[in-house]
Amino acid sequence: MTGTDILTGIALVLVIEGLVYALAPSLVERMLEALRAMPIDSRRTLGILTAATGVLLLWMVQ
């Protein structure tokens, strides 16, 4: 993995997040409210599972 790959990945995340905020701002607010209502342990587990899924997808693509 090169520095270019990392910058490409970050750029794609920013594009996707920007589109979500631009196209569905009320959905973002509802999602944030749902996250606030979740216990911290559940949020941590969700974060770990999301990161692990991302690593798995990267591994499969490589």
Image: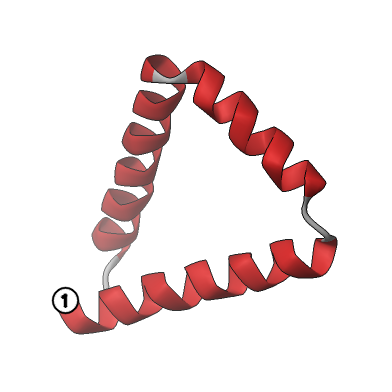
Left or right of residue 53, residue 39 in this image: right
Quarter of the view holding residue 55: bottom left
Q: Residue at x 51, y 18 (%)?
A: 25
29 in relation to 39, above or below: above
51 in relation to 21, above or below: below
* Label 1 sits on residue: 61
31 in relation to 19, above or below: below
**Split into 4 quadrants, where in the image is the C terminus?**
bottom left
Kindly give the residue lying farthest to the left in the view shown: 61
Quarter of the view holding residue 38: bottom right
Residue 9 at x, y percent in the picture: 31, 54
Say how many tags the image has: 1
Residue 19 visible in rendering: yes
Rate crowding at label 1 as few (under 14), some (14 to 19) or many (20 or more) other CA atoms within 10 Å: few
Left or right of residue 10, residue 33 in this image: right
Residue 21 at x, y percent in the picture: 46, 22
Residue 62 visible in rendering: no
Q: Residue at x 38, y 70 (%)?
A: 54
Left or right of residue 17, residue 4 in this image: left
Q: Nearer the viewer, residue 53 or 35?
A: 35
Q: Nearer the viewer, residue 49 or 62?
A: 49
Q: Which of 5 and 31 is in front in this view?
A: 31
Q: Residue at x 33, y 42 (%)?
A: 11
Which kind of residue does numbered mark 1 sit on?
A: Val
Look at the numbered disc 1 and give the secondary structure of its residue.
Answer: helix
Residue 58 at x, y percent in the picture: 28, 75
Residue 60 at x, y percent in the picture: 20, 82
